[in-house]
Amino acid sequence: MDRLQPPPKIAPAFSNPLGLLFGNVTNRIGAAIDDFISDLVYGLKGATGGLVDLTGLLNATSDKAESAENAANEAIENTGQVVQQVSAIVNSITAPFAESWMTMTPGQQVSFPRALLNTNVKSVDGSTGGGGSSEGTHSHSVYSSTTPIITPDKNVLCAAFIQSNYAVGRATITFVANGVSSPCQLYVIAARMLENGDAQIVWVSEDQTPLMSIGRVEYTVTSASDMVYNELEQMIVGVHQIGAGNVRNIMGVEMAAIPRTGDLYPPQQAMNFSTSSVITAGAVIPRSSQSFSSLELLWIGIGQRLFSGDPIPRSFVDGFNRGSLGPTWTMIGLSPGSVRDGAYFTHGGGRDDKSFNYWSQPLAYDDQRVEADAVAVNSREQGIICRGNPAGSQFFALVINDSGAALRQWTAKGDNNFTPLASWSGATTGTRWAIEAIGDTLTAYQRVDGVWLERMQVVGVTLLVGRYTGLFCDRDFFTNSGVWDNFSSRDMVEIGA
């Protein structure tokens, strides 16, 4: 598709609110990138505005978040490694934009509004009469809440019918999955309803489990080529979990049982199909094999292709200006991280262990840089994580304490399942630290008096893939850990002209 043409630029000059996404727009990258990002903003907002929620856009109004963003934007200029150039194109969205309460992804149709994925707190008040003449009437309040998740059976395609409102190619499918230990295989399926009610498989993704976080995340899968649906055609999209391991809960709702007249098909929106084999494109699910007995409907959307070419580089920042770590972080160890006084740490208690946390969304490339401020350091270890696998069992970490720093490679889950790679002795507190993985080279930097200094470098590392980044801290019995602040991570790539 062609790129959407931006409107003419007018004073004041265009500023880059998506700097988190693309990183540094400097002379080194070139003025063409300013134009590219301007195109992107217009392509996502359209002529009437309406900024789209994209991974990595956080609390940009926070002073601390802005500070972390600025530090991340310096990453390209402060690396000694060769950074690859990528080409990414933002496609025009020709489909009608859905309201944000339906979906926050442009050009999508969904099984039901995203706003219904909420925890509804309800209260029921009632009065109870006394059991005897001396007992008075009193009141009770009962509080309950709903959890908008469904638990699909293994070896069952959990799908939804969505009627196509416009004839246009579709390529993105979005759903929300919860984390689970030892997940089984997960495939995303797209199909169409034929005139006789059979379902013809249009596209099947690769197994998504190796790419998905172990925490809850909204996840979008993009097909290699567009899937064309005609107007008013019934699209069928779903998730199929098979093989060894545990199924993930999927965000969804339980519908009311409402029988439809017999001459209408499908009889309801949610459809299941049982098979323990990988479904293949071109296969047909007979009408007689489709099951409509379950009332559980997953939230899932299907829409137009957003980007072409290489993946859009991603960047994340967090200034921790809140009371808890929140859903943007996923615990990958046995103990959770915490937030206190606007910074990340682990509260001392009755255990001696580390808190490992991933940022919930992955970066787009394996070449990456992660930074954080060591605002308080003690004898306990604290670390910055890069190039992590989805399971949280393999990653690199820059580890510091009050006597120095080290580079390590974790090879399995656990506090001490690592291989030492390098070490350095010196003062660590009150400075900003960075770990950078580019190709087979792993480097640690410390920023002292505004200057980035290389402290350690290891060439020839063997962990070459991994998109997750994060932090950890180590506590002792009733002793708090050190403290990190102003976290940032970004893909170490440049967008070519």
Image: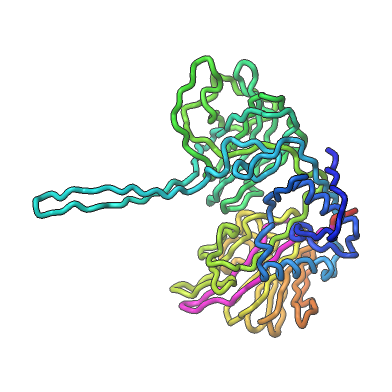
Q: Is residue 240 above or below residue 448?
A: above
The residue shown at (77%, 55%) is 313
277 vs 399, nearest the viewer: 399
- Where does residue 20 sit, x and y in percent of width and height? 74, 60
In the rendered image of this protein, does residue 453 appear above or below residue 208? below
Q: Nearer the viewer, residue 418 or 62?
A: 62
Q: Residue 16, percent across and down?
A: 79, 59
Name the residue located 55 percent from the left edge and 42 percent from the top edge. Answer: 244
The answer to whether residue 491 of the structure is visible from this angle is no
Query: Residue shown at 50%/47% (left/top)?
Result: 118
Predominant SS of the magenta segment: strand
Give residue 293's position: percent from left, percent from top.
46, 27
Q: Nearer the viewer, residue 125 or 146?
A: 125
The answer to if 473 sits in the magenta stretch is yes
Name the residue at the front extreme. Answer: 11
Quarter of the picture containing the N terminus is top right
Question: Residues in magenta?
Answer: 465-494
Horizontal relation, residue 187 to residue 248: left or right: right
Location of residue 182 with respect to 287 vertically, above or below? below
Check the image and report above or below for 178 versus 30: above
Count numbered badges in the picture. 0
Residue 106 image-quadrant placement: top right
Residue 29 coordinates in the image, percent (x, y): 88, 61
Q: Is residue 254 magenta?
A: no
